Image (cartoon, rainbow, N blue to C red):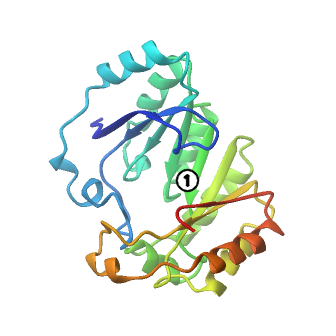
Amino acid sequence: MKIIGFIETSLLDWDGHIVASIYLPGCNFRCPYCHNKNAVLNPNSFDEIPIDYIESYISENKDFLDGIVVSGGEPTIHDDLQDLLRKIKGLGLKVKLDTNGTNPDMLEHLISENLIDYIAMDIKAPLNTKYSDAAGVEVNLENIKRSIDLIESSGIDYEFRTTIVPLFLSKDDVYSIISELSGSKKYALQQFRPDYTLDPALSELKPYPSEIIMDLANAAQKVIKTVTVRGDV
């Protein structure tokens, strides 16, 4: 597996944890507001980071690291993802996986093999025709629904998260997402940032004002156990 990014220490990628973060290339979505566009569109432009270096760093620093985040791109497009996670778990650290939820079969396998300790799944839009617009490709919603159900019933910690992009999500759309996630453990509302997006046209798009984001967060708190807001609001 080619690893294209490695952050040795992060306080932002897993709430309440000190982690190192691994980034994998490629994605099966083309979200216009994506900030990792080179990882999505030009995955071969990156130099490979040797896994030996990463394993050595983790071994030498696992006393202060709480875990490892595996992100992308979309990690579950890689058939050998389980091999990477097994190496990390073998070093004695917890694993957080970032995913778009399009591969429930792999998620089920990784959970059953105890290879992940936390899942963060992006919810792009309400579970209707708007989902494909936000993802930039045609999306199999049954896979998304199955991943949500699988994560909620897995017994491991998790969060769902949505980037609130005005062009793709109205307030009512976010209310629909909140309703669909009612009873979930954790939901993160992420403020849209109009910089370095996959679609350059979005650089002119103004984010929702903080009052709207906080109103949405307050609505989510009524039906979801833990709600957090990320980004400049």
Q: Dividing the image into 4 quarters, which one contains the C terminus? A: bottom right
Q: Quadrant of the N terminus?
A: top left
Q: Label 1 is placed on what type of residue?
A: Pro
Residue 165 is left or right of residue 217, and the answer is left
As drawn, is 126 to the left or to the right of 26?
right
Please state the horizontal and vertical placement of residue 40, each as a whole percent of the image: 29, 58
Residue that badge 1 annotates:
104
* Direction from residue 82 to residue 218 in the image, left or right: right
Using the image, determine if residue 60 lies above or below residue 198: above
- Image point (51%, 33%), residue name: 19
Q: Residue at x 30, y 21 (%)?
A: 53
Residue plotted at (38% across, 72% down) = 194
Q: Pinpoint residue 33: horizontal percent, then vertical percent.
A: 39, 71
Q: Quadrant of residue 175?
A: bottom right
Residue 80 occupies quadrant: top left
Image mark count: 1
Q: Is residue 158 above or below residue 114?
A: below
Q: Secondary structure at mark 1?
A: helix
- Residue plotted at (27% across, 37% down): 2
Depicted 85 relative to depicted 165: above or below: above
Left or right position of 12 against 72: right
Residue 111, image x, y percentages: 62, 39
In the rendered image, the vertical position of residue 197 relative to residue 45, given as above or below: below
Q: Quadrant of residue 46?
A: top left
